[in-house]
Each structure stands twice: as C-alpha cells, then as structure tokens.
Amino acid sequence: MSRFDSLAPALAAAAPEREVWWVGEEAMAWRESFIELLRSARSPKAHASTPEDCPQSWRIHLHRRDTLSLPRQPIHGRENGGRSPALVIWAVPSEGIAELVDRIGEARRCRPGYEHLTAGLVSPVERTVLFEVGVRAHLQGPRHWRLHARLLGG
Amino acid sequence: MRSGTLPRLLESTAACLWLIDSAGEIVYLSPAMRLWLGIETDLPARVADSLILDRAALRTGDAFRGHVTQRLHVPLEIAGDGDRNSAAEPRTAVAHFVVLENLSAAQGTGDSPPAGPPGMILGCLGNYLADTEIPWQDWFGVQGVRQSAKLDEELARFRGRQKRHANLLLAGTSRPSRRLRGRVELACNIRSHIGLIGPPGCGAAEIAAMIHHDSAPGEPLVILDASLMDAELLEVYAAPVIAELREQAETTGTLCLDHLDEMPVDAQTRLSEWLAAWPQRLRLIGIRRDTAHRGDTSVPLEESLADAMEVFPIEFPPLAARQDDLELIASGLARSTRISREAIDWLRSYPWPGEWDELTGAIQFAVEIVAGDRIGREHLPLAIRSYRRPQSSGSHVSSSDGVITVGPRPVSPHDFQIDSLDDVLSQYESKLIERAMIAADGNKAEAARRLGISRSRLLRKLSDGGVG
C-alpha cells in the first residue's frame, strides 16, 4: 500500500448536500426532533460507511402548503449522479387530510423525483390513504425518525 | 369493586365497560354495563366468569397483541331469583378487550394519557357498525363529515387518474405490450398472489393498484414500502388489513409491498406467518426489481414468500423494447396537446433508463413549457433532445473500385462523445496527483514541484477531493 492510499478519502468527491422541503406549519415537535436528529450523533450520517453514502449537510426549506413551489428534480438516471432523492415532508393538518392528499398527488404528478413523507397524528385508515397516494413513510410520533433512518440516508 | 382513578374517568361515559385486574377479578362495572346485565347488587360468579378474558387469547404464536375481540355469551340472571336459571338463553354480544399495561409503560415517555394499574384489562361491549349506520354528524360534527366526503372525492379522483395512467402504460400493439396487457388483464379477473418484476420506475405500482381494484373491489388494501419495514413497523402499518383478518372470520385483505426484494428478514418472517395463517384470505402483491437492477441492498426472499411471488408473476418489459408503442402512450399522456413527428422520433430513439416514470416526467415537462398546442423537440427535456444513439461497434463492410473490405468501422469525428468533461478532467487530474505523490514518496512539497503548482494549491486540491 502506497502512502498515497491513506489520502484516498480526502480525494473522494465531496458528499452532496441533501435537500428537504418541510411543508406546513403544524407538527412543530416533529420538525424540532428531525433537526435534533440531524444534529445529534444519531444522525444517519454517523452510520454511513463512506462519504458518498450520505449527505454531508442538509438544507431544510420551510414552506406553507398554499405557497409551495418545488423546483424540478433531474429525472434522468445519469443526471442526479446516484444521489439520494430530495425529500418533501408534509406536516399533517389538524382539520383533516383531504387537502393534503390533493396536494401530495399534484406534487408527485408535476414534480417527479421527490420522496414524500408525512409527519403528524393520523388514524390508521388515513395512514393507509396516504400510502396509497404515494407517501413512502409516515411519522406518527416525533421520536419515530430513527425508524426511518434508511430513508434519510443512514 | 373500584380501584384507582380510572373508574372515575370511565363513569363519565355511557358505554358498557368493565375492568379486569391482573388476578383475573372484575374490579369495576360501569352503570351502563350493570343495566345491560340487569344486575343491581353483587355480580353472580357465573356472569363474572363469562366476562373475564383468558389472557392466552391475547397472544398469537409468540406475538403479544395487547387487544382482542371476542363474542360473549352471558348467562341471563333474573332479578330476585337467587338460583341459577339454566333454561334462559344467554345474551350474546361482541366484546373488545384492551390491555392497559402497555399504556402504563408508555406513560413515562409522555406519549400517552394516564392509564390504569399495570396488568389491567379494559372490556367494552360494542357491535361493528356499517358505514351507513354510523351517526357521522353526531360523532364528528359538520366539519368532520365535510372532510370525510372531500377525502373520498380526492381519493376517487386520484384512483381515476392512476387507472388512466395504468391503461396508458399497457397501451400499444408491440409484442411485449400485448403480452404484458394479457397478463395484467388476466390478473384483474382472478384474486391470487401477484409478483410484479421490472426495472425501477417501470410503473408497477400503478398496475398493482389497478389489479387490486379490479380483481377485489372494496377489499381493504394497504400499500407499503417493504424496504423500510421491520416486523414491528409492518405489524403497525398493516393493521388495517391484518386486524380485520384476525377479528372477522370472513374478511379478506391485500398487502401491496413495493421493494419486496429489500424487505428485512424479520419482517419477511412476520409476513410468512400471516400467509401461513390466512393462505386464502390474505393476498400479496409484491413489486421487485428485475435481476439486472438488483443492488447490494437486495435480500433473498423466504421460501414461502418466493413461492407466493411465483403464483402469478408478471414481468415488465423495458420501455426501450416498446418503441412502436411510444407514440400512442406519449399522445395519451399529453392529452389535448399534440406531439410533432420530430419529437416522436426523438422519443423513440431514446433508451429510457428511467422507464415509465421518466416518460411521464418528460411529457409533463413538455406540456408545462410548451406555449402552443404542439410539442416539438425543443420542448423535451435536455437529456432526451441531446441524446445521441451510440454507433454500432460491429463489423463494417465497404466496397470501392471492385474491392470489398470487411473490418472494424472507421472512427468518424462525429462519433466523439463523453458523458461529462468535468468528470474526465477530474479523473485525469487525480491520476496525475497520485503519480506525483508516489514519485515524491508522499512529500507534498516535492509532489507540488513535480506538478508545477504551489504546495498550498496541491493541499487545497487534496482537501477538496482532488477536483480542480
């Protein structure tokens, strides 16, 4: 092994930034625990084996549901360079999920390339509906983030 | 007969409730329950026996469920008659039992409201109500009823759009599409386990939903990403189907599991137990990637799951093998917007590595940016309109002046193409730095001199990942 081999990690390409769109003003406890998870040693990045496996840093965009404007994501296989897709985390409104279902469906149709998650209290039937319209994971409790560490890149 | 603060909370309801302590004794009966039993004084022993739950019923195999629903047969006691009246027909009702000890354990986390002492079981009488019998407005208010109706409407609209997309995915006259359509149409007419296999983004989720709604309309469906499930999460998320199967002898249900080939082993074991427990009533629709696209995260399927996936496998052909169908499919996706002949040619020559998802995304993109009612080549995403089909590397035959030459195709200046100039330059630079570091035996100052750059610039390149 040459002395240069030990420098290989330093030569590796810089890990990309992972972007998250947090939509809605509810579920503040979920948001705080999500940020806390990223900051803490239990962050998914702490479990990654190589820098490419997980994002080095996270950028969280906060949006209201009615003003959400998602940028287009690369949908071509070579364009995103194998990076994990950007996340959209929808806070569940207290008055019901009907409007949320509509907005998630619209976002998935018009802006493909995102992973969609929901956070907040819903009934089992509502959760089933959310999964049917394309939500990959639902966070029923603020402390459930680590159950989905794999989705976050860990 | 009363213990703790829980009975005081329970007394505020008009429900038929009772509490069973850890010793199996009934420690509380709500007034409504006393009225239902027709009891004014102490609870007769044989009535009490009929209300007590055998704790073994709370377990399924090794799994502790924490709740169970049973049919009760309560002997009728006639007021004023101290003797047993064995001739009277017992009263029958559906009872739900919930163990409160789990709630007590969770109390320390602050996630749950206060509950009764550990080991207590709460019993409650109640029959299942059909949707039409539920007093929605009384229970949920006018706003709640409106929300429910709106949710039904949104869901119906989503399903309609999804079915339209699924039909478009199956459209076409090419042989692969006819074969796929035939398999899917057959699957829509029978209720069996289905294994969908295809490249990522092939639209299998839309087809899975279509098959379910056509083959078992109204049957409960839970769609999950299997790669994210461990046994515990699977139990919770699949509950709308699994709980019904446990508690209703006649019901059926479907689990649709995406990324089934990445399902963790413990979740596979739980799923296999369910399939063994309800072989006919639980239907599985699994979506797996084809062998060409299985990665490091792929997990071998347990035998029973692999068998279930072989009952009715449907393989999705790559979109690139359906070039003849692309005009029809793209026109359907674009709806009222027309697609020019030139754009169709570009769609047909593109290899579609992202499959169906990429096609729908590309047409959506074009429809959004087109100003008129006709999509041209310039409206397609850059990846498609800049794609050049690789030239064949096979033998080349040429003839001139009566001489026929067979050999490799001569390289043309027009053949030149690289994926990314930055990537190539970066790789080349990394190799030069590596050679310089080896030549300088790891001495960075010497390596910088050999490369003709300053030491600080070399250090910056090393720390930046070697990209100049």
Image: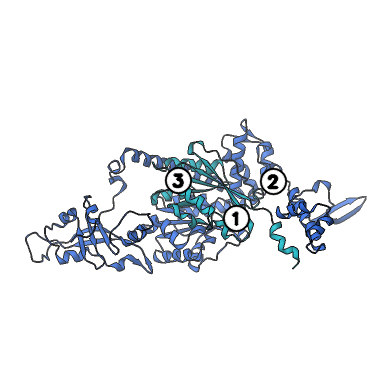
Q: Give residue B129's mark.
A: none
Q: Is residue B140 above or below residue B73?
A: above
Pair 3/1: label in front: 3
Is residue B197 in view? no
Secondary element under disc 2, as helix, strand or loop, is: helix
Which color has been applied to chain B in this rendered view? Answer: blue
Residue tagged 2: B349
Q: Quadrant of residue A10?
A: bottom right
Residue tagged 3: A28
Dot 3 crowding, Cα within 10 Å, few <14, some 14–19, many 20+ = some
Residue at 32% across, 65% down: B58
Pair 2/1: label in front: 1
Foreground of the two, A37 or B17: A37
Residue at 71% across, 60% down: A8
Residue tagged 1: A54
Secondary element under disc 3, as helix, strand or loop, is: helix
Three-letter code for the amino acid on which mark 1 is drawn:
Cys
Three-letter code for the amino acid on which mark 2 is drawn:
Ser
Which of marks 1 and 3 precedes in the sequence? 3
Which color has been applied to chain A in this rendered view? Answer: cyan
Q: Position of residue B333 (x, y in %)?
A: 57, 40
Q: Which chain letter goes with mark 3?
A: A
Q: Are marks 2 and 3 on the same chain?
A: no
Query: What is the spatial separation of the Cα atoms under label 2 and label 1, in whole angstroms?
Result: 35 Å
Direction from residue B193 to residue B16 in the image, left or right = left
